[in-house]
C-alpha cells in the first residue's frame, strides 16, 4: 500500500534545468571555457558539485572553484526563477490529491537548499506543503546513491515499499531503486524505453498523467495496476505486464550481454560445457541472469535457466517470463533441457520468446510452445 510520495525536483516538479545549464555555460564562459548544453547533459540531477566538475574534468579545465560557481549561480538563478514560469504540469493537482488521500510527501533534490526552496516558491507552493524536504546539504553521497531517499524514508518513518519515487533522470532512477522504492520515470528528460530498461516500474509523461485521485488504492491503480481482465496467464500465474512496454531490441541486446557475462562465471569442471541464461520479467522489464553450476553429485547440478528463474523469484516473487535468452558455445545453439523446460512452463506463456545464441552471435528464435507444446501444469493452478 502506498503511504508516501517522494519527488525529485528538477524535471518532476519544475523545469529549471534549462536555466541551470545556461547559467553554467555563462559561468565557464567567464572563465574562458566555452561549453554547450550537451556538455552538461550527463550531470543533470546528480548535485551541484558534479554539475560543474563533470564538464570541467571532461575538458581538462581546472581554473574554476565550486564556491565561486555556486555563488555565481545563486545570484543569477534567484533573479531568473522569479521571472520565468518553471512549474511542470500536474504538480498542484497531485499535491492536493495526495493531501486529501492522507499520503505523506517529500521533496528529495540533489540541489542546494536555497535552490530547492526557491523552486517550491516559484511553483506557488510552500515548503510546509511537504512533510519532508531533503536537499544536498542533508547527505554526503548524492544520486545515483540511494541515500537521499533512504534519509527521507527514515524521517517519514515508513518502509521503502510503502513509498513511490518520481524521477526523470537515470541517476535519480538508480537512486530510487537503490533505496528499495518502486520508482516511476517521467519522460521530461529521458525517453520512456530507456527509463524502463533501467528499472522504472512505470513511465508517465509528467505528473498531469496521474490526474486527481481520492485514495492510495486509486493512485496505485493509476500508476501500476492492471484490471484482472487485462492480466495474462504465465504458466500457473496471473501477471500484470508492465505499462508502456519497452523496445524489444534493447531488452534482447541487454539480455544477451547479461547471459554472456553469467556464462563466463559458470561452474562446469565436469562437463566443461558453460551456459548462461537471462530472462525478462513481464511485470517489471527487469533482467535476471544465471549460469550452470555443476556438482560432483551429478543430480545436484542446476542449469543456467533455472538459476535465472530463482534469481527473479527471489527479487520479485511469482514472475512471468516475456523473453528467455540462452547462450552456449554450441553450434547450433543449445536449447534448454527437458527439466528446465518444465520449470520454465510454470512461468511462461506459449508465446514467450526463447532466443538461443552461440558465442559468435548466431541465433535461433523459438516460441516456448515450439519447445514444449504440452507442458504439465497442476490442474488446480490452471487459469
Image (spheres, rainbow, N blue to C red):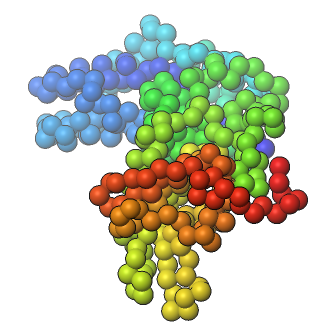
Would residue 25 appear left or right of 128 to someone viewing this image? Answer: left
Position of residue 145 relative to residue 63, above or below, is: below
Q: Is residue 264 visible from the viewing direction of this image?
A: yes
Would residue 19 appear left or right of 240 to someone viewing this image? Answer: left
Furthest toward the left, the residue is 32
Query: Residue 258 versus residue 363: which sits nearer the camera?
Result: 363
Question: Which residue: 63% across, 59% down?
Answer: 372
Query: Residue 160 versus residue 282: which sits nearer the camera?
Result: 282
Question: Which residue: 52% across, 51% down?
Answer: 366
**Number of dots carrying numbers:** 0
Furthest toward the top, the residue is 83
Q: Is residue 140 visible from the viewing direction of this image?
A: no
Position of residue 152 relative to residue 10, above or below, is: below
- Quadrant where the N terminus sits is top right
Query: Residue 309 versus residue 112: which sits nearer the camera?
Result: 309
Furthest toward the right, the residue is 380
Q: Quadrant of residue 25?
A: top left
| Residue 96: x %, y % from top left | 74, 21
Would residue 163 appear left or right of 228 to someone viewing this image? Answer: left
| Residue 287: x %, y % from top left | 52, 53
Position of residue 90 relative to residue 178, above or below, is: above
| Residue 312: x %, y % from top left | 60, 59
Question: Which residue: 45% across, 46% down?
Answer: 252
Position of residue 308 relative to residue 253, above or below, is: below
Question: Which residue: 62% across, 27% down?
Answer: 127
| Residue 157: x %, y % from top left | 72, 50
Q: Quadrant of residue 143?
A: top left
Query: Residue 33 versus residue 167: which sits nearer the camera?
Result: 167
Amino acid at each position: 500500500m502506498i503511504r508516501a510520495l517522494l519527488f525529485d525536483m528538477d524535471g518532476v516538479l519544475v523545469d529549471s534545468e534549462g536555466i541551470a545549464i545556461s547559467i553554467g555555460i555563462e559561468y565557464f564562459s567567464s572563465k574562458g571555457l566555452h561549453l554547450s548544453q550537451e556538455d552538461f547533459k550527463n550531470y543533470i540531477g546528480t548535485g551541484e558539485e558534479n554539475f560543474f566538475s563533470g564538464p570541467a574534468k571532461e575538458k581538462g579545465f581546472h581554473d574554476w572553484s565550486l564556491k565561486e560557481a555556486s555563488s555565481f549561480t545563486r545570484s543569477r538563478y534567484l533573479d531568473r526563477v522569479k521571472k520565468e514560469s518553471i512549474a511542470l504540469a500536474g504538480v498542484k493537482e497531485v499535491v492536493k490529491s495526495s493531501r486529501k488521500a492522507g499520503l505523506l510527501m517529500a521533496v528529495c533534490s540533489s540541489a542546494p537548499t536555497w535552490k530547492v526552496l526557491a523552486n517550491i516558491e516559484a511553483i506557488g507552493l510552500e515548503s510546509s506543503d511537504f512533510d519532508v524536504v531533503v536537499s544536498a546539504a542533508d547527505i554526503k553521497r548524492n544520486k545515483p546513491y540511494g541515500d537521499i531517499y533512504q534519509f527521507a524514508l527514515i524521517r517519514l518513518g515508513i518502509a521503502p515499499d510503502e513509498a513511490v519515487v518520481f524521477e526523470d533522470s537515470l541517476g535519480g532512477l538508480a537512486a530510487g531503486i537503490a533505496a528499495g522504492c518502486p520508482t516511476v520515470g517521467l519522460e521530461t528528460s529521458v525517453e520512456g524505453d530507456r527509463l524502463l530498461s533501467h528499472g522504472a516500474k512505470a513511465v508517465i509523461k509528467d505528473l498531469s498523467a496521474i490526474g486527481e485521485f481520492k485514495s492510495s488504492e486509486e493512485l496505485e491503480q493509476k500508476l501500476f495496476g492492471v484490471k484482472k481482465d487485462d492480466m495474462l496467464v504465465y504458466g500457473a500465474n496471473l501477471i500484470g505486464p508492465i505499462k508502456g512496454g519497452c523496445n524489444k531490441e534493447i531488452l534482447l541486446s541487454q539480455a544477451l550481454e547479461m547471459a554472456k557475462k553469467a556464462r563466463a562465471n559458470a561452474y562446469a569442471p565436469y562437463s566443461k560445457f558453460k551456459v548462461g541464461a537471462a530472462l525478462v520479467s513481464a511485470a517489471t522489464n527487469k533482467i535476471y541472469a544465471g549460469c550452470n553450476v555443476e556438482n560432483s553429485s551429478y543430480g545436484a547440478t542446476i542449469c543456467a535457466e533455472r538459476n535465472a528463474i530463482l534469481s527473479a523469484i527471489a527479487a520479485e516473487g511469482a514472475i512471468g517470463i516475456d523473453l528467455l535468452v540462452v547462450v552456449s558455445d554450441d553450434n547450433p545453439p543449445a536449447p534448454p533441457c527437458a527439466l528446465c523446460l518444465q520449470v520454465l512452463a510454470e512461468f511462461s506463456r506459449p508465446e514467450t520468446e526463447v532466443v538461443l545464441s552461440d558465442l559468435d552471435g548466431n541465433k535461433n528464435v523459438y516460441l516456448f510452445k515450439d519447445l514444449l507444446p504440452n507442458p504439465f501444469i497442476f490442474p488446480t493452478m490452471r487459469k
